[in-house]
Image (tube, rainbow, N blue to C red):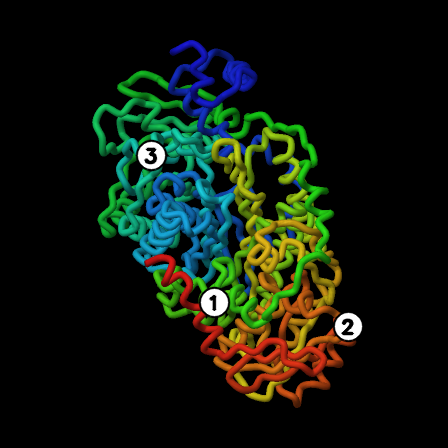
Amino acid sequence: MNKNAWRELGLSDKEYQMIVEQVGREPNLTELNMYSVMWSEHCSYKHSRTSLNLFPTSGPRVIQGPGENAGVVDLGDGWAVVFKIESHNHPSAIEPYQGAATGVGGILRDIFTMGAQPVAFLNSLRFGDLEDPRVRYLFDGAVAGIGGYGNCVGIPTVAGEIYFDPCYSNNPLVNAMCVGVMPKHRLVLGKACGIGNLVVLAGAQTGRDGIHGVTFASEELSNESEEKRPAVQVGDPFLGKLLMDATLEAIEKGLVCGVQDFGGAGLTCALTETAYRAGTGIEVDLDQVPLREQGMKPYEILTSESQERMLMIVDPGKLKELEAVFQRWELSLAVIGKVIEGGKVIARYRKEVVVDVPAESVAGGSPAYEPESREPGYYKILAQHDLSLIPPPDDYGKALQGLLSAPDIASKEWAWRRYDYSVRTSTVQGPGGDAAVVRLRETGKALALAVDGNGTLTYLDPYAGGMMAVAEATRNLCCVGAEPIGITDCLNFGNPEKPEIFWQFKQAVKGMAEACRALDIPVVGGNVSFYNEVEGEAIYPTPVVGAVGLLDNPEKTCNIAFSRVGDLVCLLGASNVSLGGSQYLKTYCHQVAGRLADIDLEFEKKLQVLLRILITEELIVSAHDLSDGGLSVALAESCIAGNSGAEIELNNQVSPILQLFGEGPSRIIISFKPGNKDKVIKLSESSSIPLLFLGEVCGDALIIKSDGDIILKLSLGTMKEAYEEVFSCIMR
């Protein structure tokens, strides 16, 4: 072994000494490679796990929290929902199609590994300025990869979000979420239980693709990153579909007692984590691993991240029946070892022991760091930006047109029409609204699904931005009438070893945790993605929240559309807004600055409860969360969705620019029949939630008045053209 080989593998001198102490000797090169991948930031969370302890992870519905392949939450009626979100950022920056596709494939396996039938995909994407040809290449490739894998496996992609900013130009974010359902009794964990049970490898053959992929994901990108293209895995969705169906059949028939996906760190991760969780050991023969390339070395076999592979723990008496299942799906199985006592992972290659390490050390023995944290210099400077100097537009109509055609706000139909969002015929509401709704045929209920995050807001105020990410995701579930029951998170940040970056991370996590506690929402799993930097320039801190809600009656739901002439239009919720961090400031002043509007979490909770009551009692026709672009954009989106106009009167006490383009949390646009007016007023008053009457649904244009004068008038056709044709033009 080369002197200081551990440094070349990304381990520090201190970490190497810890390994020597835990193993009781110097590790050989194969063992050192195993430690390198498992002690990488991507696998070990060594810079983040102390902060993650702030999250509430338990609750009356939680069956399985963080620490397994995915979180599991009770739906009642003997059923459970399984969900998780993960990043595939660095691979997508190098090879966008395969990076995104294997991100989808990896998160899919996390779900069916638990015994759940996947029912929906979601995604959260960030890219640079679309004027840049390379950004367009990355964007087009990632969207194609998401659709290419998801469509082939027959799981609908029902919701997502896409944002653009120069800070993501060379380091895009591709966060993939999957949701599945299962009878509770079918839950299988990733544990190597039962001394003498067989260790079985199922699915694809092992190649050299993806070797040290997790190490690649645990360092900053640079001009040399293109040379690491071999670290990007290659997916096979058709094989992935077969593996899913065969695995679910095996679990349903009780043929396996433990299942683990081959994700980051490959066989190393699957062996050490399953043994560590069970408190057992595993002995394997690497010569029994089916290879698709000749001459692979032991460390390559152990760290390869070839896709579509699964590790199963099987009672010897059930092996033949398991083989029959996989043969029926035209998949191969290979018995590569067995479960042993003693807590060690032992691997042989050509009859020689090449690995003999404690599973607990490899999978759970990495150090936990608490890096220096320091408030960045920009923070107070940007917070003091004088927002009163922002000029009002010369033409409010043209200003709204411009916002509707801004890439952050414009319809993302160009992307989601490339996804099959109605396959399986359970999609009640698909992309384009506040949350997706997927019917559960087994129970008659439905799931509501949303994914939300805002890097701009978190950059300006990480603590408030973290709170707002949780609040918006759960509020969007409530906009379709669902009760939020759990979240998963994907925390995308720069280099945690830089004090200013780690300050952003700590503050954001603190804000998210506080919001979760106030709203009684458990965090049941997630992913931390650090080192999202190129040549020392970090992305905006971007926490993304995937939220799951439960609808008892999918017939009692809402969408965002103004669909009935004569309905009253009201603003429900908070009045405080700010132009700080707004889309108006970004689009027209080309600035990211200013203080954000305050968020009151107790008020937010009351608003969400009220909204669910209004929908459940069928008192409102539409509900739409106010976020990017503020009131003006929300009104326009509701008009476009319902193909109806509206006439609105502003409050004379507040400037039109602030009312129309200011942004803030805890605000919903609702519409309802005039006959329900008294009931809506009574409920809002009893909940202490302000209700401001704005106008009514009418005509074929959005007309906005201030002090009786029309200050904005846009026809439906003009709004649709601005909102719906942007990406078709840009991505030709």
Q: Which of disc 1 and disc 3 is earlier in sequence?
A: 3
Image quarter where the N terminus lies is top left
Marks 1/2: CA–CA distance? 33 Å
For discs 3 and 2, the disc positioned in front in the rendered view: 2
Q: Is residue 718 above or below residue 313?
A: below
- Identify the mark at residue 229; answer none if there is no mark: 3
Look at the numbered discs 3 and 2 and tell me whether their residues touch, using CB distance below 8 Å.
Answer: no
Residue under the point 34% across and 41% down:
95
Marks 3/1: CA–CA distance? 34 Å
Characterize the local packing of mark 1: few (<14), some (14-19) or many (20 or more) Cα atoms within 10 angstroms.
some
Look at the numbered discs 1 and 2 and tell me whether their residues touch, using CB distance below 8 Å.
Answer: no
Q: Is residue 594 visible?
A: yes
Marks 3/2: CA–CA distance? 58 Å
Q: Which of disc 2 and disc 1 is earlier in sequence?
A: 1
- Identify the mark at residue 432; answer none if there is no mark: 1
Which residue is most to the top?
A: 3
- Identify the mark at residue 653; answer none if there is no mark: 2
Viewer-closest of 118 and 701: 701
Viewer-closest of 663 and 84: 663
